[in-house]
Image (cartoon, helix red, strand yellow):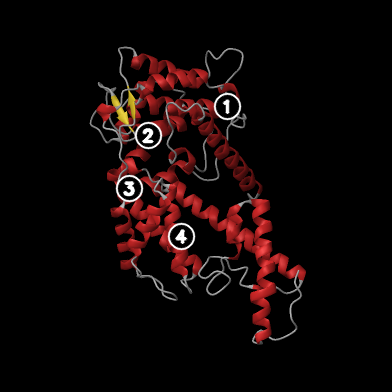
Amino acid sequence: MPRRPEVSAADPAMSDWSHGEGKRWADAMSYALVERYGRWALGWRWALDEGDFDGGPVGSWCCPRDSITTPEETLARVVAALCEWRGWLESLGGWFVAYPLDPALLADQRILWEHAARNLILQVADRTGCGSGWYGHCRQVLTWFLHAGHVTADDARDLVDQAIGGRFHSWTSPDTVLVDDIAERLALSLQPNDTPEPSEATSDHLQSWLAVRQSVPWPAASDGNGEGPVTPSHDGAVEDIRAFDAAVDPARAEGLLAALEVVRADASRGASLNFGLLQSWQQHVLAAPQPPPFRSAVAFAKGGRERYGLNSDTRTRFDACLSESANEGEGELPVALTARAARAYLDVCFFHPFDDGNARAAFLTLVYVLAREGVALDDVQLLRRVSFQAEDPQDPLVLARYVDLHLSQTRRNATASAGHTPS
């Protein structure tokens, strides 16, 4: 720890010390934290207003002049600032997961991305208090957001700068009209990636999935914490539909909520999982006058990058795969509930049984497999915001791990909630 001069904060000697010895110590601390925790730790000094780095979200640290005092107080401020920065990053990560960018789906989801950009701007404005230089961090967060959606870092910076156009200012909170205009400009500036036309895709990704499915070590794909019923502290599926789907289209959310009710009723009566059951849910999802039929042609997804073939036995094989969600015929090594739920989800994705709404059908299928054994989740974001590839042998393990993570957290929250329930 450097020795703080015994002079007033206004004394030039204090300024010299702050920009000299004090700064060198803070830089050395940054280096040590990065060595210990990783590059993300660099932001612990991104202070509010005119601190070490102008316009950041951290309130626990300002600068050597104001933040370095006794060793005990100073190190406590470092810890608080690091934790504050980490919490902010995790909060932003939650937003990025909630509003994923997929350039192949720009036409369908541009409104959703505009909504996400608007929320991120407002989040940064609130966190920084719109003080000195706050717009620099806002540009950074929007750039991170686009880069997380597979826009190159250089392109993301250019798009954000063009959308903002120098219209944010220090010590000034942006009005609603300005925020809406910048969010709209940013969403409209995005361009879909060059993707192959459906006719160019020759591989049968359904067959690729069936081969991967056979090779996955399903009994080891989950840690088994899915065993035993659990009632969540809140309904994550309903909350996610109201927050995510309603932002895209209120009618879409209504249809999915209606289907969710049927899913849970079917689970409570122990209905067998097959295409006919999915049809009854999908009728609500699509608000269709009749249960939608099994597709009658080759299907494409991910902007044409995946092609799912169709044979005379495709529907029969689909039903056979879905039946395994009940853990029947698995031999000596049973498959845990969360792995079975993940497998059924991917079956729906890659058999692609419907002409529309297959991602929603896959989500409902996962919810059903869990609900049939008395399990529900208080958060489903990781299960709805990540795209999986038919040919990747690691993706099934990743999805099973995501289900495990959500279920573990649900159990912890349920236990904590029960512990605070008045007797």
Disc 3 vs disc 4: which is toward the camera?
4
Q: What element carries label 1?
A: loop
Can residue 141 be spotted in the picture? yes
Q: Are marks 3 and 4 in contact (CB under 8 Å)?
A: no
Residue topped by disc 1: 221
Q: What element carries label 3?
A: helix
**Front one among 240 and 295:** 295
Residue 154's x, y, as percent? 40, 54
Residue 100's x, y, as percent? 41, 46
Residue topped by disc 3: 248
Disc 2 from disc 4: Cα separation: 31 Å
Q: Is mark 2 on a helix, strand or loop?
A: helix
Disc 1 from disc 2: Cα separation: 22 Å
Disc 4 from disc 1: Cα separation: 37 Å
Mark 2 residue type? Ala
Q: Are marks 3 and 1 in contact (CB under 8 Å)?
A: no
| Residue 257 in which image quadrant | top left
The structure residue drawn at horizontal position 45% and vertical position 76%, both measured from the top left corner, is 171
Residue topped by disc 4: 140
Label drawn at residue 15:
none
Earlier sequence position, callout 4 versus callout 1: 4
Can residue 66 be spotted in the picture? no
Earlier sequence position, callout 3 versus callout 1: 1
Q: Do the residues labelled 2 and 4 touch (CB within 8 Å)?
A: no
Residue 22's x, y, as percent? 68, 72
Q: Mark 2 Cα within 10 Å, few/some/many (few <14, many 20+)?
A: some
Mark 4 residue type? Gln
Where does the N terminus fall, quadrant-wise?
bottom right
Residue topped by disc 2: 359
